[in-house]
Amino acid sequence: MNFTNILESIPVVGYVFLGLFILASIVQIVLAALEKEIARRYEKAFLIPLLTVFVIVSIPTHPLVYVALITAWIGDILVAIPSKKAFACGAFFFLACHLLNTFEVLLVLCNMNVPAMVVVIVVLTYLVVYVVGFIFYFRKIAKSTLEGLGMSVYYSALYLLIPSFAYAIALVGQFVYLGIIGYVFFIISDTLIIIFKYVKEVRRKHVYIMSTYLVAQLLIALGYVLTYIALGL
């Protein structure tokens, strides 16, 4: 299936919601630049649902993809609440988002008869990143050992998506590369959160955090949609 046919396979309503997501994302960045924090937080709640509808109408038979987006949406709402407990709960939902995306990629790889060793390598990658991250970084910047362990769990899951998508690129091809680029932006966004929270506070920080985050979610979603349509899955 060529690229034109792929684009024609996306329903018109899908393009409508994709366009609304892009427009709402621009509004979000403008509000962040103007430091209209209350308006920005309220407007933020509408972003991921728009992208989720685009995914649902485009690839309705892949529930893990849009469930991952829904968990990210819940995380968005929780981290916007000025509370440490709410922030921790939001991080948990983002962790669920990354794990769901990992499962989705592994399912794709299993459909391509990937060797079991690849799954083993993915799991070992998570464990290595977790241990190294905790010993050399997260326990040093966290305010408690428990917080450091939690940060290690979260960022290990986040970084795990890079080798997972890399295997998918090698075996599946198509538009999977958009997913790996998207997760690079996700890593940048969450790294900025760590820097601004634990190292140095800056003005208009949400311009940088949200712009990289929204690009990440858009590219990941497009990677799934275009790849699955191209493969007829």
Image: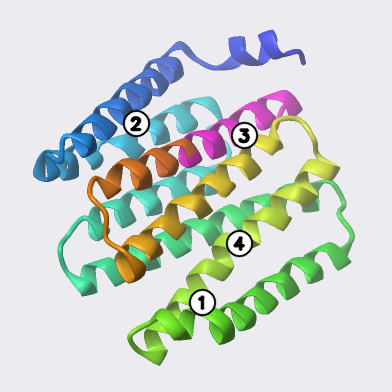
Residue 59 position (above or below residue 111): above
Q: Is mark 2 on a helix, strand or loop?
A: helix
Using residue 82 as the reference point, say whether residue 96 is left or right of it: right
Q: Mark 4 sits on what residue?
A: 159
- Crowdedness of circle 3 by 10 Å Cα count: few (<14), some, many (20+)? many
Q: Mark 3 sits on what residue?
A: 223
Using residue 117 as the reference point, say whether residue 202 is left or right of it: left
The image quarter in which residue 79 lies: bottom left
Mark nearest the camera among 2 and 4 is 4
Mark 4 residue type: Tyr
Q: Quadrant of the C terminus?
A: top right
Residue 10, horizontal then vertical, whole percent? 55, 17
Q: How far apart are marks 2 and 4 (CA)?
A: 26 Å
Residue 177, horizontal then vertical, whole percent? 70, 37
Residue 111, horizontal then vertical, whole percent? 79, 47
Q: Mark 2 sits on what residue?
A: 50
Q: Quadrant of the N terminus?
A: top right
Q: Residue furthest bottom?
A: 145
Report the span colored magenta: 216-232
Mark nearest the camera among 1 and 3 is 1
Q: How far apart are marks 2 and 1 (CA)?
A: 31 Å
Q: How far apart are marks 4 and 1 (CA)?
A: 10 Å
Q: Mark 1 sits on what residue?
A: 152
Residue 78, horizontal then vertical, whole percent? 24, 59
Mark 2 residue type: Leu
Q: Distance between the residues labelled 1 and 3?
A: 27 Å
Mark 1 residue type: Ser
